[in-house]
């Protein structure tokens, strides 16, 4: 069994395959307490709350 490819892949074919590797923008939701944009299922960086409960103290 050989590891080498049978035929050469052209640059166009190679680049077409790599065209689907793109970054997606992070999904942001509004904080239920302060309304700031944050990542879902994480503590809000603006007010320090999660699920309307105070988790960490944030310095003003």
Image (cartoon, rainbow, N blue to C red):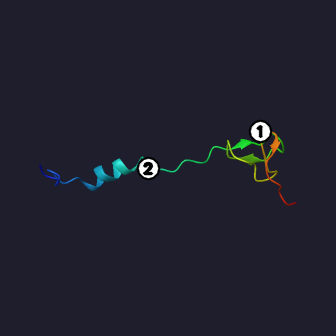
Q: Nearer the viewer, residue 21 or 1?
A: 1
Q: Are marks 2 and 1 in contact (CB under 8 Å)?
A: no
**Numbered badge on residue 24:** none
Say above or below: 52 vs 12.
above
**Left or right: where 41 falls relative to 56:** left
Query: Residue 42 at x, y = what percent?
Result: 69, 46
N-term-proximal mark, 2 vs 1: 2
Where is residue 49 shown, x and y percent of the image?
79, 46
Binning the other alpha carbons within 10 Å of mark 2 as few (below 14), some (14 to 19) or many (20 upward) gives few
Mark 2, residue position: 21
The residue sitting at 83% across, 57% down in the picture is 58
Residue 21 is left or right of residue 3, and the answer is right
Other-residue count near label 1 (Cα within 10 Å), few / some / many at <14 / 14–19 / ≥20: few
Q: CA distance from mark 2 to mark 1?
A: 34 Å
Q: Secondary structure at mark 1?
A: loop
The image quadrant where one finds the C terminus is bottom right
- Residue lying at the far front in this picture: please name it: 55
- The residue located at (34%, 48%) in the rendering is 17
Quarter occupied by residue 52: top right
Residue 35 placement (x, y as % from top left):
81, 43
Residue placed under numbered mark 1 in the picture: 51
Q: In the displayed image of the protein, which residue is found farthest to the left?
A: 1
Residue 33 percent across, percent down from the top left: 83, 42
Which is more foreground, mark 2 or mark 1? 1
> Which quadrant holds residue 34?
top right
**Residue with the most extreme right position:** 60
Nearer the observer, 49 or 4: 49
What is the secondary structure assignment of the residue under circle 2? loop
Task: Residue at 83% x, 55% y: name it.
Answer: 57
Q: Residue at x 17, y 53 (%)?
A: 3
């Amino acid at each position: 069994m050989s590891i080498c490819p049978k035929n050469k892949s052209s640059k166009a074919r190679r680049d077409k395959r790599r065209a689907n590797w793109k970054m997606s923008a992070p999904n942001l939701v509004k904080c239920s307490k302060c309304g700031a944009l944050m990542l879902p299922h994480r503590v809000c960086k603006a007010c320090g709350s999660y699920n309307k409960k105070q988790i960490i103290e944030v310095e003003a």
